[in-house]
Structure formats: C-alpha cells, structure tokens
Image (cartoon, grey):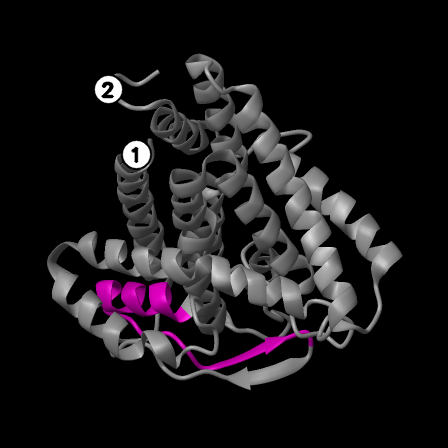
Amino acid sequence: MPLRLGTTAAGLVTGYVTDALFGDPRTGHPVALFGSAAARLEHRLWADSKPRGAAYAALCTFGAVGLGVALQTATRGRPFARFAATAVCTWVVLGGRGLAAEGTEMARLLEAGEVPEARQRLSHLCARDATTLDSAELTRAATESIAENTSDAVVAPLFWGAVAGMPGLLGYRALNTLDAMVGYRSPRHRRFGWASARADDVANLVPSRIGAVLTALCAGGRVRESWRVWRRDGSRHPSPNAGQVEAAFAGALDIRFGGTNSYGGEVESRARLGEGRDPEPVDLRRAVRLSRRVGAAAVALAAVVAR
C-alpha cells in the first residue's frame, strides 16, 4: 500500500497504476460481463417508454452500486482488504491505457494512409458513422473522442471513487456503460434510453468540468489559451459535458473541433470549438499524450480528496 495514503486513496492510485501498466483484464472483463447482463435485461424489459427505460436504468445501476456497498461493508475495519478491493474496482472501471492505445493505433493507420482500416477501427473509440469519412474527418473524430473519453474513462471514475468509494466507482461505470448501450438517439432507444442518457449527463456534470480545468493546467505553454477556449466554447457542444473537455483540448493543442457528424443515420451539425487548424494525425498523438497527463493529474487530485 502506498505510504501516507488512506486506504481508499491508496486503492485508487494502485488501480490507476495497474491500468496504466497492464490495461484492461484480457478475459472476463467485469464491464463486459455487466454489459452482457444489461443487454439481456433490456431484451426482457424493452418498450418504447420512458418509464420502462427509467426502471431498466435504475435496476442496472442500483445493482452495481449495491455490489459496491456490499464490498464497502465487507471490508469495513479491514484496511488491507479495503485497499485491495478498491484497487481492483479502480482497475476494472478505468480505461486510460486502452484509450491511449486506440488513439495511437488510429494515428498509425491514418499516417500510413490506411483509411478503410481506420474506418473500422474508429468504432473502438466512438459510435460515429465512419463509412464515408475521409482521413481528415477520421482524425477529427478520433481526436475528439480522445478528449471526451479522457473525462468519461479516467477523470469521472476517479472523481466518483474519491467521493463515494467503491459504490461510486461501480455505479458510475454502470451508468456510463448504459449510456453507451442505449443512450444514443436511435429510434429504438430515443425514449427507452432517455433516463440512462440523462443520468449519465448528471453524473458527469462535475467531472467533465474538473477534466477541463486539469486539461488547461496540463497544457504546457498553452494554459491560458486552453482555459480561454474552454470558457468560451465549452457550452457550444450539444452535450452539457463533452464540449467542456473537447474545448479545453482544442485550446491546449491549438486545433479546431466540430462540424458535421452522423450517428445511427442521423446527421447533426456541431459548432466549432477552438480557433486553430483542423486536427492532423500528429495532433491525435499529441492528444494521447495530453490525455495521459490529465489522467495523472486526476489520480493525484483523487488521492487528495479520498480518505
């Protein structure tokens, strides 16, 4: 256990380091198992109804929170067990190494001109329709996803782990997984997934803004520019949270996000974030490095906040 840290703080740091070194568990990933169980439950409960969708979201999320509460209760008065359980939970809910690996691989494919392969690979980062995207649009989509998922996959889980321990870690990851599964505005999920999407928005309100602040602080010589672009452009995104970190990244990297995107056949035009040039594959690599710095700052902050 890292010295001079409380059990929860030590568990968060150890879980973060484990993810950074080894990435996701190779088999039987608990998040994948949760997703499979949630998919089966959706098959049983689905109806074109917001109340049914809310019940589905509550059952899935409270199940994950309940597991966290059980672990928290079982390890009360047992510091090493609390530390170990927190470390394992942190490891399985974080996605920092995987995010960096996907961004790096996308950059390699785009630099090599392997556009068809990059179109297929983009699905590992986001749900954007990639069939007709060219190299420039693929680069933008991947770089935006690195920025957004730095908050979703690293900053937010650490925040909830710091303030709510294992129930916070597991509950947040459950909500974020549900949002990815049913939160998109497809005809099937427009009403059924509404509660999952809104709950995920609420869970990310504070972490996304912390992520934007940390991004600015980690921006090297562009701290002021990152902060200014975030404050000016963060609310221009249709999501109340994604635009926060995306705008901060755009300012930090001196690039520009936004444009026309397609999700599930629905096309939307997003406002521009930032004032630099359009991102290039080298900027995708820079975004990966910035994401890692933000993750390190986030775990340091979480260790200070956690008991």
Rendering coords of residue 16 (x, y %): 40, 33
Residue 260 forms part of the magenta stretch: yes
Vertical relation: 9 (above or below) 37: above
Q: Which residues are magenta?
A: 243-264
Q: Residue at 67% of width from left, 29% of height from top?
A: 27
Residue 74 in picture, x, y percent from top left: 57, 20
Closest to the observer: 42 or 95? 42
Where is the C terminus found, in terms of image quarters? top left
- Residue bearing mark 1: 303
Q: Is 241 left, or right, of 268 in this rendering?
A: left
Instruction: Name the residue nearer the viewer: 75 or 213.
Output: 75
Mark sitting on residue 104: none
- 235 relative position to 77: left or right: left
179 above or below 186? above
Q: Is residue 26 above or below residue 280?
A: above
- Judged left or right of residue 148, residue 283 is left
Q: Where residue 241 appears, x then y in whole percent?
A: 42, 67
Q: Secondary structure at mark 2?
A: loop
Question: In percent of the image, x 45 and y 35: which residue is there?
Answer: 165
Q: Is residue 233 left or right of residue 261?
A: left
| Residue wearing tag 2 | 4
Structural distance between the alpha carbons of marks 1 and 2: 11 Å
| Amino acid carrying mark 2 in the image | Arg
